[in-house]
Image (spheres, helix red, strand yellow):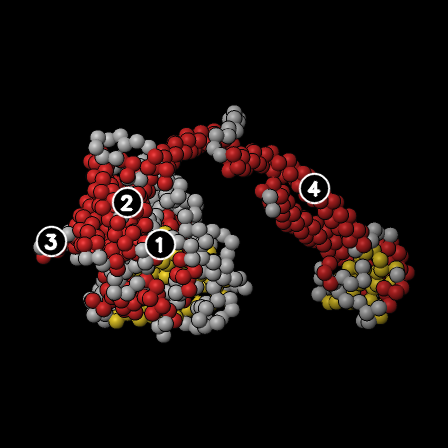
Amino acid sequence: MTFRTKTIVGIALIEVVLLMVLVFSAMSFLKQSNEKQLIQRANSTATMFAHAAKDAVLSTDIATLEDLSRDFMQLEDVHYVKIVRHDEVLACAGDMELLERTMNVDQNLGSVDDGVFDTRVNITSGGIQYGYVDMGFGTSAISAMLDSAKRSIVGIASIEVVLVAIFSFVLGTYLTKSLVRLTRATHILREKGPGFQLNDNSKDEFGELSKSFDLMSLQLKQSYEDLKTARQEAEHACESKGRFLASMSHEIRTPMNGVLGILSLLEETKLSKEQQQLVTTATQSGSFLLSVINDILDFTRMESNTLRLEHQPFELKTCIEDVVDSFGPSAKAKDLILHSYIEGDVPSLVEGDVPSLVEGDVNRVRQILHNLIGNALKFTQEGSITVKVSAIPASNQQTTITCSVIDTGIGIEQSAMEYLFDEFTMVDQTYSRTQEGSGLGLAICKRLCELMDGNIEVNSEPNQGSTFTFQITLNLAQSLTSNVEPSTHQMASALSGIRVLVAEDNKANQLVIKNMFLHAGIQIDLVENGVQAVEQVQEYSYDIVFMDISMPQMDGMTATQKIRALDDPTISTLPIVALTAHALTGDKEQFLKAGMSDYLSKPVRLSQLIEKIELFLVNEEKEPVEDTHSNKTLEPMDSTPAPVQNTCVEQNSHATETEPHHGEADLNLVDESILQQMIEDTSADVIPLLIDHYVEESKDRLSKIHESVAEQNGDQLEFESHTLGSSALALGNRQLSSLAREIEKLCLEGNVSEAFALEPQLQQLAQQSIDALLVRKDQGFETPSSSNI
Ligand code: ADP
């Protein structure tokens, strides 16, 4: 009901009530005064008649009484007269019907039931009653008058009500007009923002109200503008902070990878125990710093909403088991029990449920689990860590996964739990805190869960343990294959949880590969031969194996066959990618026949390694790639544009045609594109050290080659020239590599004497190539300019 209607109804109601009171009191006053007059008149008339008739009654003068009665009948409103003496009617006049009925004396108008007011007066003389006089007075005139008065009063009251209603309507409209304007103004304010002015100059209260409104609107506008500016400035500052953090993280990460690379090289040198300890500590600190930087990068991406989730089919059960397994050695080292319970309703290929895959970002799911289990391990000194996973269908196409990580560790105080998921939060803020961390892990987990339509919560008791439970909603995948290619950039950045085993005997190659993976933030395990590879895959769980073909003790193909023959299906079905210097026709068939999943020709690029990981760990049903020298440039982790697009042997073989241009050394013996590629895949800082390592190792190989020729040992020549060929290509000595391979091929084909004959040429080319490489090293290497997140 509007204010105007309320005003009208309110005033009209008051008016009606007042008028009713007035009408009733006026009517009752009129009735009472008329009644009084009637009773007085009836009594005085009847008394007068009794006096006049007294003598005639005493003398029984009937004629006089009748005359008297007729005379009184002439009076207005007298309906009958009756004179009675000792129950004998002496005379009467008037309405016979009224005279014949039994008369009841009326005391007031209320007792009149026949339209006649009946009264009786005794006829007395000397105190003796001789009879009485009954008289009837008509009340119709009074009733008619009262009715008419009532009608007039009600009529006047009704007119008044209508007039008051009209008046109150006009008043209400006038009063609410200003209110309506004010209401409209507030609507405008709400829709268009502050600033609207009423400009009402009237002098009444509404004028005052309008002025206050205008002032408030102006002040609001000013505050609004100030806030907008402050917000823009804050957003700008936040963006700058994000950009600064991102570029700083990026800038720190690149040299950090270099530092880690150098440390890994240092590890390979002869060190005292104390030095080894220092290198290990430096490596651990470097890795921790790198993980913090990665966290900061992730966080800045989330802050600026640039973090996008992948939507790829994956097997959830395996993903969870893999992450839990990867903590096995750390749990064992701390004497903690680590186990997982994955309920049957969790989509899984092994269980044969349909559908068996979920769709989402497997690496981000891993990251959440990794953080929570990592924290549980960090903050638990004894007892156990349990991972429980269950699933309930959210709809036909979706499932909600609930995962709890329960530990029996130090627990968390109630007061700390409120801000636990805030960024940069650590419960132990003291300088003496025992565990390192950035305080970003849980904040990232929370954001990731929210991005996956879920949430995360914690329950904890100090000194009892903590339970972190997160829920995420994932789509159920329709089939194993998906046409959507994941972005390699995101792929590479999220591969840090992947466990890779590399079997490679050549030290220089080992270092190159290790540094490449380090550059991508992936920790790998290295073994030197097939025997170690077979043992290692049984002892620890891996996601993929990169296997060199020619290795001492057991070659890559035999090792692969042995792995494929193992009983445990999770090991025997591991993706095994051959790393080979052999690129002869038919080799590929041979590798695949031996059970290898795919192969890469040396020198390998980081992008190719990542491509294979992506191929086997994400799109597991894809066929192995036919051309390992694919032109598709997969960006490494930092998405730095590749200065060199292709390093194919065939495409760069013209390098020898140009003249030498640097003193004695022929720099054409160094394939610059390979070096540039290696800088991109590792870091400019580590290249000189890798070269030194290669040079030292090559000298050793060359003397072994010389020995094998002197001893006419074809097998040794074949093995050493293979190894030299492989590492020479990795470091850019392409021609040396080709000649070494030529010798290896001759040995393989049984033309050993021809191979022996080429040895002096090899020694000479090797010397020149190494010299050229050292000259190139002295010129220095530069890291290509970086890109932002
Ligand atoms: P951090 O890198 O410091 O581990 P997180 O965000 O992952 O950062 O964790 C924030 C803090 O929450 C930790 O520093 C620790 O104090 C507390 N915390 C996390 N997980 C646990 C746990 N399982 N038990 C006890 N405290 C924990």
Query: Is residue 357 visible in this depiction of the protein?
Result: yes
Q: Are marks 1 and 4 in contact (CB under 8 Å)?
A: no
Residue 736 marker? 2
List the residue tagged with mark 3. 271
The CA distance from mark 2 to mark 4 is 117 Å
Q: Nearer the viewer, mark 4 or mark 3?
A: 3
Q: Residue 402 appears in which quarter of the rendering? A: bottom left
Q: Are marks 3 and 1 in contact (CB under 8 Å)?
A: no
Instruction: Indicate the secondary structure of the residue bearing disc 3.
Output: loop
The CA distance from mark 3 to mark 1 is 35 Å
List the residue tagged with mark 4. 162
The CA distance from mark 4 to mark 3 is 112 Å
Q: Nearer the viewer, mark 2 or mark 3?
A: 2
Identify the residue shown where x is 85% and y is 64%: 98
Identify the residue shown where x is 32% and y is 50%: 742
Instruction: Indicate the secondary structure of the residue bearing disc 2.
Output: helix
Kindly tell me whether mark 2's CB lies below 8 Å from ligand 1: no
Q: Are marks 4 and 3 in contact (CB under 8 Å)?
A: no
